[in-house]
Amino acid sequence: MPTPPSRRSSLTRRDFFRVSGAGAVAATAAAGSASTLNAQAPAGSGAASAADAVGVGFIGVGIRGEILMRTTMAIQGARIVAAADAYDGHFDRIKELAGPSVSTGRDYRRVLDNPDVQAVVIAVPDHWHVPMALDAMAAGKDVYIEKPMTHRWEEGASLIAAASTKKRILQVGSQWDSMPANAQAIEIIKSGKLGKITLIDGRIHRNTPTGAWYYPVPPDASPETIDWDRFIGKATKVPFDAARFFQWRLYWDYSGGLPTDLFVHLITGTHTVMGVNDMPARVIGSGGIFNYPKREVPDQMTAIVEYPNQFTLTLTSTANNGHNFPPLLIMGTEGSLEYYGTRLVYHSEPILENYTYSTNHFSKAAKAKFAELHDLDPENMRPRATSSMKRPEPQEIQTPGTESTQRHLEKFLECVRTRTEPTENAAAGHRYATVGHMVNVSYRAQKPATWNASKQVVELT
């Protein structure tokens, strides 16, 4: 790939699909029976026989759940045993992928009651995340729960406590924790090549109706094929609406919108490469509905996230323009790092001071004397030591590795087998989701949201 220009590089279509986790999965996942195992073992684990494979149950096999099911089928040491969903049409897709022996049904508790299931993957609307994860751990199952871990920031403590007391593995599914570029990015940051990092800019943009969550509705969707009451749960009761069922991200009752869907990826990546284990002190959220009126959550959001004495994180996402930016741009006093999840672009940015502009108001004599006193080249008014220095060309760094969703699931299954704590455990998932929740709290109240560390609560100021 040619060296990119010194300005920000665009996020290519290839990069976008790798970052989103959807592209490579479709190419690697293979259909087969529930007990079929891929011949390739995940990194860090030994070969596993079918008898030793972890029995996996799925709760929710919609857009993301189907991707996770296909990905699981590509992983050595896993077998799909059972699945539950509130839409009957997904049962046909499950059996197309995993074979007729997989048990299916609307009641997720049957998955939890199945003694052949050791671990469950939960990929359902956000308002069901915590109840299902708590039920799963109470039933003795390990849990892979899609991001955001919680629907409200107040729920995080319950999952942290349950994972500890029940001695269960709980891994949150924000796969940016497992991006191939992470190790190299961490190495560059720790080396000091960027200098003092003060600002990180995060962006994910889209410009299609499906990117704005107006997902297609299957032609057989009806009150007969959808368990509406099960979908609604404890949310506000509303009449049956098939579009609402499949486009649930548009509504506050089931979703946190852009901050907890897309910002959480950027927050996960930032915390991972920067080694942040704290909540931000203050978050200011701004946004609105600018282009898609038939929704409750904004179609555009921006936030300022403050980590005192560390750095400021800015977050932006719009569903109304697809211009490409690096998902994360990490900016330091001596360099910048464009982070694409699957590759990096490093910019060395030495300080090339130039006093021409700031001394033009001096008289010629004063300007010459200033140059003499400060050892400047009188031709360009730059320090002689850097007078001929040019800004280096950016350096593209390829970071090959396993696709992030697959690697994230591999790490979860490794933790299930070895009983070791995941890096993206309940505590980490709580932090990442809570930053997103703080954006929403601030936006909806039109006030800054702060984290009270002593009380462990979000407050408005």
Image: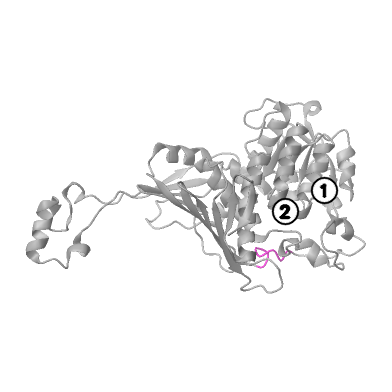
Mark 2 sits on what residue?
Answer: 151
- Residue at screen point 73% across, 34% down: 164
The x, y position of residue 241, in whole percent, is 84, 67
Q: Nearer the viewer, residue 309 or 345?
A: 309
- Which residue is most to the right? 224
Mark 1 sits on what residue?
Answer: 94
In the rendered view, does 8 fall on the left or right side of 351? right
- Residue at screen point 80% across, 50% down: 60
In the rendered view, does 408 fall on the left or right side of 321? right
The x, y position of residue 200, in whole percent, is 47, 52
**Which quadrant holds the C terminus?**
bottom right
Say whether residue 214 is magenta: yes
In the rendered view, does 281 fall on the left or right side of 9? right
- What kind of element bears circle 1? helix
Q: Nearer the viewer, residue 40 or 141?
A: 141
Which numbered dot is residue 130? none
Magenta extent: 209-215
Q: Is residue 95 visible?
A: yes
Residue count near mark 1 (Cα–Cα under 10 Å), binned few <14, some 14–19, many ≥20 = many
Q: Nearer the viewer, residue 254 or 337?
A: 254
